[in-house]
């Protein structure tokens, strides 16, 4: 066991000291930072060009419009000439000219593009209300008559907010989970294969196998790679927590987080449970298969090619979940939630949606753990032979040959 931990630590330290690991870890943070920074600068630079000025010779009419409307309105420009100049310089999206003609309210919009749909609806609503008030005054209607004419039908929607939030939380949780498995798989499949293939056919392997068992060495290699994966996940979790704290103390973002607090809590509840165990075990079994792919290649430079079948298998599991997000009672989903390599995708999907009971979860988990143990044991028994030979037999030829030797 001591020698296994030495191999694990050596593999772990070599991987985390590499430039590729550094770029892989900081890459998402840099992308998020650049996206937020560019979006912020773009929003500030484009904010003025999206504004609309309101022009009117009737100050009561203009003030009434400005008082009722909310949105990107420029209140500083008050003349048509200034508005035309600002539009020409792309400092305004357009300007709205309000006037009264023969007791009729009229609004004319001038701009380089059509009026935004939200502003258009607000303007139409204001014009209707203001015109109606003018009509009432001109008709000299009593207050009771005005109240009767203003009576409108009422339409109300009664939606269970908790149910809607729960469904949205399930969808978000599903996408986060399966995307995490898929990204980790395609990232570390080639790394695992390359790590194993780099030792293939070297004289040092003969010395290593004379001092420790092939199974212990193989387990140590896999353990080191898994520690690298855990390190990256922990860094992302800490980065996400730090980002949440920054957003929570931001005056601009705190109201949004407070409004969606129940949604955030539901998503975290769906992720921080047995689904994390499925995610980790799924990564383990795919990593073992990728390592085996690296062990069967004749040359180390072919390791990335050998890992492609592993990536394709993971892609199949990833894309196979898409059609069944709203059909979790399908027989296909129930079967694959017990099949190793696919249960890490399908069983968490059933857990998130609450369509599976406790003993079914434990049975699926037990099958996955047993499959990992048997798979690792089989590869460990074949590991010394695979690492010391340099023939050019294919993946399947090695698998069949090893199975015959076992029997």
Image: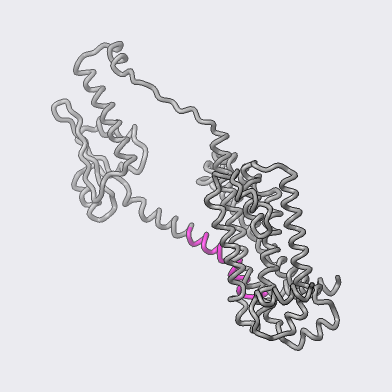
**Highlighted range, magenta:** 16-35
Which residue is at 21% across, 45% downward? Answer: 110
**Percent from the top left, x then y, of residue 83?**
23, 47
Quadrant where the C terminus is found in the figure: bottom right
Quadrant where the N terminus is found in the figure: bottom right
Q: Is residue 26 visible?
A: no
Which residue is at 65% across, 81% downward? Answer: 393
Residue 44, quarter of the rendered image: bottom left
Residue 31 or 172: which is nearer the viewer?
172
Which residue is at 73% across, 53% downward? Answer: 365
Residue 341 or 13: which is nearer the viewer?
341
Residue 326, quarter of the rendered image: top right
- Does residue 18 show up magenta in the picture? yes
Q: Is residue 125 visible?
A: yes
**Percent from the top left, x then y, of residue 334?**
64, 48
Q: Is 220 placed left or right of 350 in the picture?
A: right
**Percent from the top left, x then y, of residue 161?**
54, 33
Q: Is 370 placed left or right of 353 in the picture?
A: right
What type of secondary structure mainly makes up the magenta span?
A: helix
Residue 394 or 11: which is nearer the viewer?
394
**Percent from the top left, x then y, of residue 287?**
68, 67
Q: Is 127 placed left or right of 186 in the picture?
A: left
Residue 294, quarter of the rendered image: bottom right
């Amino acid at each position: 066991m001591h020698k296994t931990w030495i191999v694990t630590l050596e593999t772990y330290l070599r991987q985390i000291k590499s430039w590729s690991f550094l770029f892989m870890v900081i890459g998402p943070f840099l992308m998020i930072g650049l996206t937020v920074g560019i979006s912020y600068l773009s929003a500030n630079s484009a904010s003025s060009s999206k504004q609309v000025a309101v022009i009117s010779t009737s100050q009561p009419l203009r003030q009434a419009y400005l008082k009722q409307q909310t949105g990107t309105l420029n209140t500083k420009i008050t003349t048509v000439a200034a508005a035309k100049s600002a539009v020409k310089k792309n400092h305004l999206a357009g300007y709205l000219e309000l006037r009264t003609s023969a007791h009729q309210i009229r609004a004319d919009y001038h701009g380089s593009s059509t009026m935004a749909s939200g502003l258009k609806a607000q303007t139409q609503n204001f014009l209707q209300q203001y015109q109606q008030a003018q009509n009432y005054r001109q008709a000299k209607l009593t207050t009771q008559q005005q109240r009767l004419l203003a009576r409108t039908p009422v339409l109300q929607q009664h939606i269970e907010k908790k149910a809607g939030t729960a469904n949205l939380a399930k969808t978000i949780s599903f996408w986060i989970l399966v995307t995490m498995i898929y990204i980790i798989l395609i990232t570390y499949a080639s790394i695992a294969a390359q790590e194993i293939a780099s030792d293939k056919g070297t004289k040092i392997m003969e010395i290593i196998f004379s001092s420790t068992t092939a199974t212990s060495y193989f387990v140590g290699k896999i353990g080191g790679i898994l520690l690298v994966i855990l390190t990256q996940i922990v860094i992302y979790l800490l980065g996400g927590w730090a980002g949440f704290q920054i957003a929570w103390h931001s005056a601009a973002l705190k109201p949004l987080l407070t409004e969606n607090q129940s949604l955030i809590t539901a998503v975290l509840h769906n992720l921080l449970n047995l689904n994390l165990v499925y995610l980790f075990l799924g990564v383990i079994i795919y990593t073992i298969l990728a390592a085996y792919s690296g062990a069967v290649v004749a040359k180390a430079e072919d390791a990335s090619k050998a890992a492609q079948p592993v990536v394709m298998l993971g892609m199949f599991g990833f894309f196979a979940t898409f059609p069944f997000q709203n059909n979790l009672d399908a027989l296909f989903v129930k079967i694959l939630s017990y099949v190793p390599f696919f249960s890490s995708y399908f069983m968490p999907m059933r857990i998130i949606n609450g369509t599976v009971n406790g003993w079914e979860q434990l049975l699926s988990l037990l099958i996955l753990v047993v499959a990992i143990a048997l798979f690792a044991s089989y590869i460990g028994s074949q590991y010394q032979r695979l690492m010391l030979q340099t023939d050019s037999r294919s993946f399947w030829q090695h698998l069949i040959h090893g199975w015959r030797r076992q029997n």
